[in-house]
Amino acid sequence: MLAGCASSGAPVARIAEPRIAQAYLPLQARIHLGIDTVDGAAVVIAPGIAVTNAHNANLVDPKSIIGRRRDYDLMFFRTMRGTPPDTAPVAVGGAVIAYGQGGGGGLRIARGVVQQIVRCQACTTPNYFIFSNDRRRDDNAGPGFSGGPVLDTSGRLVGITFGYKDSGRQRLIYAYDMERVRAELSALQKPAN
């Protein structure tokens, strides 16, 4: 079972890639009488359109939501911020960097290596990929990374984080490949027959 969804924030000053810094959207909502916060992230993927996880719906203005995908934990919404970054395919063995929000409003960065690309038999695009992260590091991915961008070492967007699971000293982070994200947005934008 996948754990988790949330943590805190706003700053994007530590994102080294300028196009990702412009496209990164921290998400936050106050809960429990305004005392506690729930956090996630989003990223601009097309002009005026951002993506996050559907389980982050409480962190986005409902009037801006374009739609959610039933079979995938993806939600698309309108935004005035950012320029879409360059994208690239993900590769097994490739190093990746993920961004998310952490407690106290800070940006968190997690580094890992792609372990597996998962495809279903009937799918034309990958379902998702899994990368590992050393849990002993302070910057390990987990709460607050939901909906956040995953980049290759060239700073290109390769995926959107949707969950994690601990496995010994490693944390396995699950992310949708950008090909899957684009396919799901395209399916939402198709006119109904």
Image: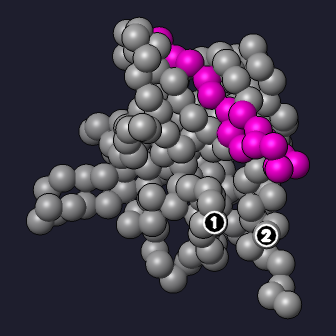
- Could you give the CA–CA distance between mark 1 and mark 2, rounded to whole angstroms? 9 Å
The numbered dot on residue 85 is: none
Q: Amino acid at mark 1?
A: Arg
Q: Whole-percent x and y of residue 138?
A: 37, 16
Query: How many numbered marks have been drawn onto this rendered protein structure?
Result: 2
- Quick check: 42 above or below 163? below
- Quick check: 60 above or below 5? below
Magenta includes 91?
no
Nearest the camera: 106 or 62?
62
Residue at screen point 81% across, 67% down: 186
Give yes or no for contact between labels 1 and 2 (Cβ–Cβ under 8 Å): yes
Helix, strand or loop at label 2? It is helix
From which residue to which does the magenta span run?
118-134
Quadrant position of the N terminus in the picture: top left
- Residue 45 visible in the snapshot: yes
Q: Whole-percent x and y of residue 61?
A: 46, 74
Helix, strand or loop at label 1? It is strand
Q: Whole-percent x and y of residue 119?
A: 76, 38
Quadrant position of the C terminus in the picture: bottom right
Q: Earlier in the sequence, mark 1 or mark 2?
A: 1
Quickly name the residue at label 1. Answer: 69
Mark 2, residues whose alpha carbon is within 10 Å: few (<14), some, or many (≥20)?
few
Residue projecting furthest to the front = 121
Quickly name the residue at label 2. Answer: 187
Residue at screen point 32% across, 60% down: 29
Nearest the camera: 192 or 53?
192
Q: Amino acid at mark 2?
A: Ala
Residue at screen point 56% across, 56% down: 73
Magenta includes 119?
yes
In the shown orientation, is residue 148 left or right of residue 8?
A: right
